[in-house]
Image: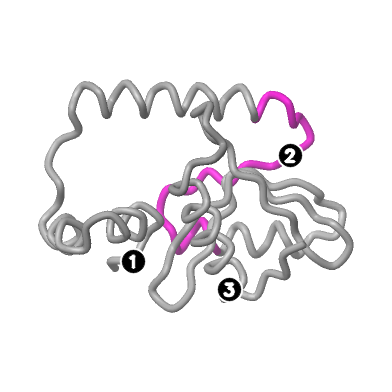
Amino acid sequence: MSYITKETFLEALECPTRAWYNRGVGGGAPSTGDLLRMEEGMEVHRRARALLPGAVRVHEAEMTAAAEHTRRLMADPALVTILEAGFLVDGFATRADIITREGTGWRMTEIKSGVNDENDEYDADIAYTTMVMTRAGTRPV
């Protein structure tokens, strides 16, 4: 099944036509620069995960399985932190880098490899993830 992902959403904010095209037929192979940025991002995530040794990571690549695993983990009151939590609702899919239980809600933390925290794309990224999490029934804090 095809979902609207965070990447599709962010791309549509920049250029709706390109997002529509890429969602339908694919955007082609990543460039060397894209591959380097992906590798750097994976390294930043790996280092961030190392700072949270008690956290449980959702490993499933397929979104339905990731969302189901996330639901099971969130139902365990002893579990405090989940990494790469998956959420799927109404055709929207996303992953939250870190969610931490706080009282009856969950705090989302996104990991970014950039140094400019005043990036409009970061705001849209966080807004999309929050929207999908909330629609999936998660109470943000």
Residue at horizontal 12 percent and vertical 59 percent from the top: 21
| Mark seen at residue 136 | 3
Residue at horizontal 45 percent and vertical 28 percent from the top: 41
Q: Is residue 119 above or below residue 123?
A: above
Q: Secondary structure beneath disc 2?
A: loop
Q: Which mark sits nearer the N-terminus, 3 or 1?
A: 1
Q: Horizontal placement of 57 versus 67: left or right?
A: right
The amino acid type of the residue labelled 2 equals: Ala
Q: Horizontal placement of 77 versus 1: left or right?
A: right
Determine which residue is flagged by label 2. Answer: 55
- What percent of the width, then of the height, locates residue 141? 77, 62
Q: Secondary structure beneath disc 1?
A: loop
The amino acid type of the residue labelled 3 equals: Ala
As rendered, which of 32 and 119 lies closer to the eye? 119
Name the image quarter holding the N terminus.
bottom left
Q: CA distance from mark 2 to mark 1?
A: 27 Å
Determine which residue is flagged by label 1. Answer: 3
Q: Answer whether labels 2 and 1 touch (C-beta < 8 Å).
A: no
Q: Secondary structure beneath disc 3?
A: loop
Residue 46: image quadrant is top right
Q: CA distance from mark 3 to mark 2?
A: 21 Å
Q: Which residues are magenta?
A: 49-67
As rendered, which of 51 and 1 lies closer to the eye? 51
